Amino acid sequence: MAKPKTQFVCQNCGYSSPRYLGRCPNCGEWNTLVEEKMVDDTPNRKARVSFTGQTAKAELIKDVSLKEVPRVKTNLQEFNRVLGGGVVPGSLVLIGGDPGIGKSTLLTQVSGQLNETGGRVLYVSGEESATQIKMRADRLGVGGGDFYLYPETDMGNIRDQITELDPAFVIIDSVQTMQEPDITSAVGSVSQIREVTAELMQIAKTNQITIFIVGHVTKGGAIAGPKILEHMVDTVLYFEGDLHHTYRILRAVKNRFGSTNELGIFEMREDGLSEVANPSEIFLEERLKDATGSAIVVSMEGTRPILVEVQALVTPSVFGNAQRTSQGLDRNRVSLIMAVLEKRANLMLQNQDAYLKAAGGVRLDEPAIDLAIAVAIASSYRDKETNPSDSFVGEVGLTGEIRRVNRIEQRVDEARKLGFKRIFVPKNNLQGWNPQTDIDVVGVTTIGQALKLALN
């Protein structure tokens, strides 16, 4: 419903004024202007109206037609899997990451592949000129077909361009540089980001246009702007990695069309991003066989099991307070496990500095990695290496028990495929299934039992 506005109309000559006047400037009569309400006939741009003029309407749920929308696949299978099987038409995808990590490279490469499938692409950039984007596209081998570049920041002009071209895919790089002309706040402010995202969501949902949005991140790594930005979009992806290494990780933290916490591994090369089919081999390829403080964990990232080396270095503390440092692991989880080891496994760790990391730059955050962390800490403290063909899965409780984890069959099968001969799992996970015969599955109930068998 349009918002009513007030005007003052002269009852003598019909002159209208936006404010009250004692004397009509048209006819010169006094006290003839009367306040009236008028209705603005301008269509509400916030309403869900498609470019063809169709509006949304209420209908019974039983009358809603349900049809399977085919996903659009790219040549990057890792990208397709993180999205849940491919790009969903009409979806709104937000991609965040540190500066220089490769967000624009990824989207330029994906745009070229989507264009090859027959979809028209509009790449809108508020940070680069068309020449700069063309240089990157030439380096990646992207170009030709219906691939349009549009360096613009005004959302009014962008909407007009989308209406004219009617693309199947739109890339906004980045949302912090776009501005809504009706909003008076500065570019990049909370109001601007929220209104721009709402406008893009309206375009995507009413016209079945897939829109990818690049978002800047804060110092803490979270996407800059209001948290509502992540609630409005369909999918939130984080592009992570170390600028000093070639590997990049694409992680899904929200996905209305697929599994969350999916993980895709890419290698940054001169000609663009190349997908890594078997990331477990990369995370384990530089492992030293006789090193102490090393344990292999089979972690689930979404629907994929990956094997990662957990490394620990435990040394006597020089100062009064022992340090606890972790990289790729939650520091609070490390402190908790060390307290359990001291109380339940008789390891004197209160005067020991502990440094832990997940090798390869990956971040692990699930309960099943507890046992590997405990074994790595004990291995470094006792200066005794673990068996290079062992792997570990299990959650450690505060009383020292090893608790059940999910998807144990997939974890064991992945360890078997990569040549591991023995895997330690919670004993309760052995019920109801038969392990493979070419890998020794050892069920453990307490942390003391696990350390005794792993470090014998």
Image: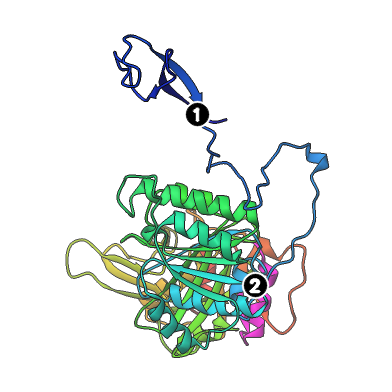
| Labels 1 and 2 touching (C-beta < 8 A) | no
Q: Position of residue 355 (x, y in %)?
A: 32, 72
Label 2: how many Cα within 10 Å (few below 14, some 14–19, many 20+): some
Vertical relation: 21 (above or below) 105: above
Location of the N terminus by quadrant is top right
Q: Earlier in the sequence, mark 1 or mark 2?
A: 1
**Residue in the picture at 44% in, 59% down:** 344
Q: Does the image show residue 174? A: yes
**Residue in the picture at 56% in, 85% down:** 389
Label 1: how many Cα within 10 Å (few below 14, some 14–19, many 20+): few
Compared across the picture, whether 126 is left or right of 315 comes to right
Which amino acid lies under the numbered mark 1 shown in the image of this protein?
A: Lys
Which residue matches tag 2?
Answer: 119
Which residue matches tag 1?
Answer: 3
Q: Position of residue 257 (x, y in %)?
A: 65, 59
Q: Does the image show residue 374? A: no
Compared across the picture, whether 424 is left or right of 332 comes to right
Compared across the picture, whether 61 is left or right of 130 comes to right
The front one of 332 and 121 is: 121
Vertical relation: 336 (above or below) 264: above
Which amino acid lies under the numbered mark 2 shown in the image of this protein?
A: Gly
Residue 276 in magenta stretch = no
Residue 420 in magenta stretch = yes
Vertical relation: 411 (above or below) 284: above
Residues drawn in magenta? 406-423
Tell us which disc is closer to us: 1 or 2.
Answer: 1
Residue 154, by quadrant, is: bottom left
